[in-house]
Amino acid sequence: MSQTHRINHQPAFVLSSHPWRENSLRVELFSRDYGRVGVLARSARTRGSELRGVLVPFVPISVSWFGKEDWKTLHKAEWLGGWQLAQDKSLFSALYLNELLLKLTAREDPHPDIYHALHQTMREVCTQPEHSLALRQFEYTALKSLGWLPDFERDEWGDAVLPEKWYRVLPEHGLECLPNPIAQDNVVQGELLLHLAQQNLSATHVQAASRLMRKLIAFRVPELQSRLILQQLQQFKNQFSL
């Protein structure tokens, strides 16, 4: 996407940041109207820099940048407030969201719907102890927006998905209606597909939704390190709760 020379007051989240040169940062942002953007935050690591306490992950910020190169120059950043930083399990969930976006999205490919879903999901991750349903719904929204999911309300023949039927989800072909359930992560009841599409998951769907979305994401990107950590934490928790 061709970008203008200067962008002002763009809502965004910090996805990652790394030291650059002596006292600056390379920062990957996910912005509302420009998608993923790489910026150089000059002197951001110096004492007294106004950027030092603003370029933090998991909270919404407002950013301004300029330039036409692959890495823009960050001009200004302001904290928009909203919620406290993620901690404990929520921290790993927030890291997972950031890693997922870095792996799934391309530079300067705008997806406002993904940004708004990220804002809503990150708020829930940072403020609610249980947020699995919000993560699954975000995964669906991201993959759907990127064109990597079939219609969850119609099968491969164009027939309406029925709640009681079983379907195999084939990312590049559609939904295959099955006569009987099969023990596969991408085989689910129509009820789950309809709830995902209509964004009204409930606690009864969380395990099946987790298996399905894990399978569909793995089809697009290699195993995510943050997801592995989350799985290990859950296994550890289950081991000591027996």
Image (cartoon, rainbow, N blue to C red):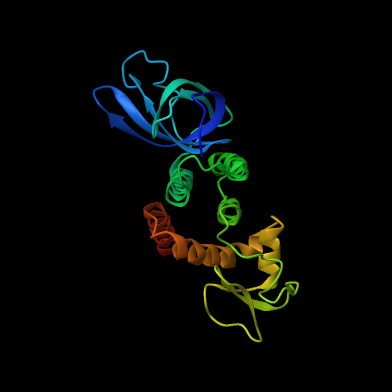
Q: Nearer the viewer, residue 191 or 113?
A: 113
Q: Nearer the viewer, residue 68 or 50?
A: 68
Q: Residue furthest top?
A: 48
Residue 6 versus residue 197 in the image, above or below: above
| Residue projecting furthest to the left | 22
Q: Position of residue 109 (x, y in %)?
A: 52, 43
Question: Depth check: 194 or 8 in front?
Answer: 8
Q: Does residue 142 appear anywhere in the picture?
A: yes
Is 239 positioned to the left or the right of 124 in the image? left
**Residue 89, position as x, y percentages in the image:** 46, 47
The image quadrant of residue 192 is bottom right
> In the image, residue 16 lies at what x, y percent?
39, 38
Whether residue 59 is visible: no
In the image, farthest residue toward the front: 2
Q: Residue at x 40, y 52 (%)?
A: 226
Q: Is residue 193 left or right of residue 171?
A: right
Spot the residue most to the bottom.
179
The mark total stands at: 0
Image quadrant occupied by the C terminus: bottom left
The residue under the point 58% across, 45% down is 114
Q: Is the residue 195 above or below the residue 155 in the image?
A: above
In the image, residue 166 lies at what x, y percent?
65, 78
Q: Quadrant of residue 136?
A: bottom right
